[in-house]
Amino acid sequence: MTRRSSFGVALLLLLIAPAAVACPVCFGAPDDPMVKGVNNGIWVLLALVGVVQIGFVAMFWSFWRRAREQKRFRDSLRVIHTFDREGPIS
């Protein structure tokens, strides 16, 4: 684009910008039922993110617990310890 056409596009955007008036939800009419619905939707999505994060924490905690139980079980099955020069190999 040339300098003149880019200036024309910028001027056109500035002239039509007032026509892009926000809806009541975006503009912020606090008593509008649509605004209340959007706010409730935001809270639901935040709760969903929290539940997913709690799920990840629970999954990794269960991985840690199972690994600890497996290690205890594996250690309880050792009957013969192999020895090298410095002592037992664990």
Image (cartoon, helix red, strand yellow):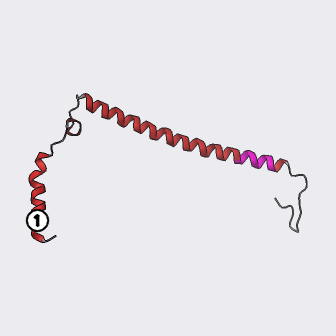
Quarter occupied by residue 80: bottom right
Q: Is residue 76 above or below residue 51?
A: below
Name the residue: 89% across, 61% down.
Answer: 82
Q: Is residue 71 magenta?
A: yes
> For this rendering, which residue is in front, 40 or 12?
12
- Which residue was labeled with disc 1? 7
Q: Position of residue 70 (x, y in %)?
A: 75, 47
Q: Is residue 82 above or below residue 74?
A: below
Q: Position of residue 17 (x, y in %)?
A: 13, 50
Quarter occupied by residue 27: top left
Q: Main secondary structure of the magenta part?
A: helix
> Magenta residues?
67-74
User: Which type of secondary structure does the marked residue at label 1 adopt?
Assistant: helix
Is residue 39 left or right of 22 when viewed as pictured? right
User: Which residue of the protein is positioned furthest toward the bottom in this rendering?
Assistant: 2
Q: Position of residue 63 (x, y in %)?
A: 65, 46
Quarter occupied by residue 84: bottom right
Q: Position of residue 85 (x, y in %)?
A: 88, 69
Quarter of the picture containing the N terminus is bottom left
